[in-house]
Amino acid sequence: MPTASLFVSSVQKELPEERRAVKAFVEGDPLLRRYFTVFLFEDLAASDRRADEVYLDEVDRCAVYVGLFGNEYGFEHAEGISPTEREFDRATARGKPRLIFVKGADDRGRHPKVRALIGKAGNQLIRRRFGTVPELTASLYASLVEHLEGVGRLRTRPFDASACPRTTLGDLSEEKLRWFLARARRERQFALAENTPPAEALAHLNLLDAGQPTHAAILLFGKHPQRFLLTSEIKCMHFHGTEVRKPIPSYQIYKGTVFDLVDQGVDFVMSKIARAVGTRARGPEAPVEYELPRDAVAEAIVNAVAHRDYASNASVQVMLFIDRLEVWNPGELPPPLTMEKLRVPHASIPHNPLVADPLFLARYIEKAGTGTLDMIALCRAADLPEPEFRQDGGMFVQTLWRDWLTGQVLEGLGLNERQKKAVAVARTEGQLTNSRYQKVTGTTRPTAKRDLDDLVRKGVLVRTGAGRGSGYTVPRKRINNGSNGSARTSSGNGS
């Protein structure tokens, strides 16, 4: 399918980040990239043609004109007209579809000619205002989807932008919407006040389809979202071992808005893992340190809820094992992202832009492609292994390790089958003794002693206690002993 050009018009030096963000978003989005390429003047190679001839020719060729208006008017030609205004006038004269996005809610401080240009555009078409790059890309997404639908290239709207069948505005919670507006205003200086009428707020957020709530609106602010979107729930499970086995000691299914699901999922995990409470030496409140960084857990869960495929019959699953946390969500990485690119700076390509934008405004996500990088940095800072990402069939899986002894590390240590079984028991039960080792593995006391000593040398276990009360535990963190990289162990005799 041939792609059409989007011409991005603005004062280049004032809005470079926004221009690049538009290009990265459109050409990275799985839907929009099928229909559009983005023209930025700064991407052109040097040539002997006049700049004004080049950009006006590109306006003539483009399928859609995208105007980004800020505070500055830009360089003025002899007749006192800037390139941005000339491009807008040319697009108007050629009958091009024009999408205008104005940065900021307040026109004070703008160049007088910019105010005049905004007024001229406003007399001809609907403008959208934005404060941040995510707000801009969400509004652009909705506008381009509407354009594609209007010209007949898109027969059905994307899931998040399409009307949720059998719903009305009465299925949305005004209380939840007011909570969101207050939080977005506090966290991101969102333009709308807490008492904004619901229909106006929803329209501003592009959450209405011909006056009917979209799927995104129901997921974000529905009174009972699962009444219409059954599998939008989140399933949380806690296992005492390293494998999925019944009976499941703790199993909760949470329902509610996407905000509720994230909060409940995070609370479930944090209530099950170990925590250490410090002293009040540095302040009135005693610090609490969890074995997994709370922000990393929250990032993994919000990623799953925000980017999942809501058309799937599967749900998000949060599974806590003795050695790791796994978060599963239906869906796959959008091209051009790969597992490797998640570990380096990359563009943000939300699967559900109209769900992701309010999550950004409420500061649940950043929408800057930094989520996985933040998780990696947080785990490193906590002396934990880096998170792992993988595709498992139609599910995307994020793994956070609760300690350094990952499956990959264990494989590299050359343990025998008896030792592997014993490590699993030590993790599950919290402690291991020589007699317990014998019983679990069916071996003799001398063999158990040799195996356990080997595990101590390799740093897999540490000795605790002395005499009859001694035993072995799995250290939560690797402690470098300065020689072979194994954990430093305490002295003592095994029983």
Image: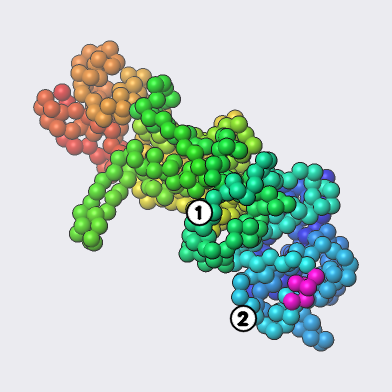
Coloration mode:
rainbow
For mark 2, give the secondary structure. loop
> Is 329 situated above or below 77?
above
Range of the magenta residues? 119-124
Residue at 61%, 71% in the rendered image: 104
Residue at 72%, 67% in the rendered image: 127
Asked if residue 32 lies left or right of residue 243, the reply is right
Inspect this view and state whether residue 102 appears. yes
Residue indicated by mark 1: 175
| x and y, in percent, of residue 382 in the image | 35, 48
- Label 1, label 2: how far apart the Cα atoms are: 33 Å
Residue at 78%, 55% in the rendered image: 147
Residue at 85%, 69% in the rendered image: 92
Q: If the image is split into quadrants, where does the C terminus sit? A: top left
Residue indicated by mark 2: 108
> Is 147 situated above or below 491?
below
Say what amino acid the circle numbered 1 marks. Glu
Q: Nearer the viewer, residue 274 or 456?
A: 274
**Does residue 152 show up magenta in the picture?**
no
Q: Nearer the viewer, residue 193 or 55?
A: 193
Q: Nearer the viewer, residue 22 or 465?
A: 22
For mark 1, give the secondary structure. helix
Q: Residues within 10 Å of mark 1 (few under 14, many from 20)?
A: few
Asked if residue 154 lies left or right of residue 27, the reply is right
Tell me which label, 1 or 2, sits earlier in the chain: 2
Q: If the image is split into quadrants, where does the N terminus sit? A: top right
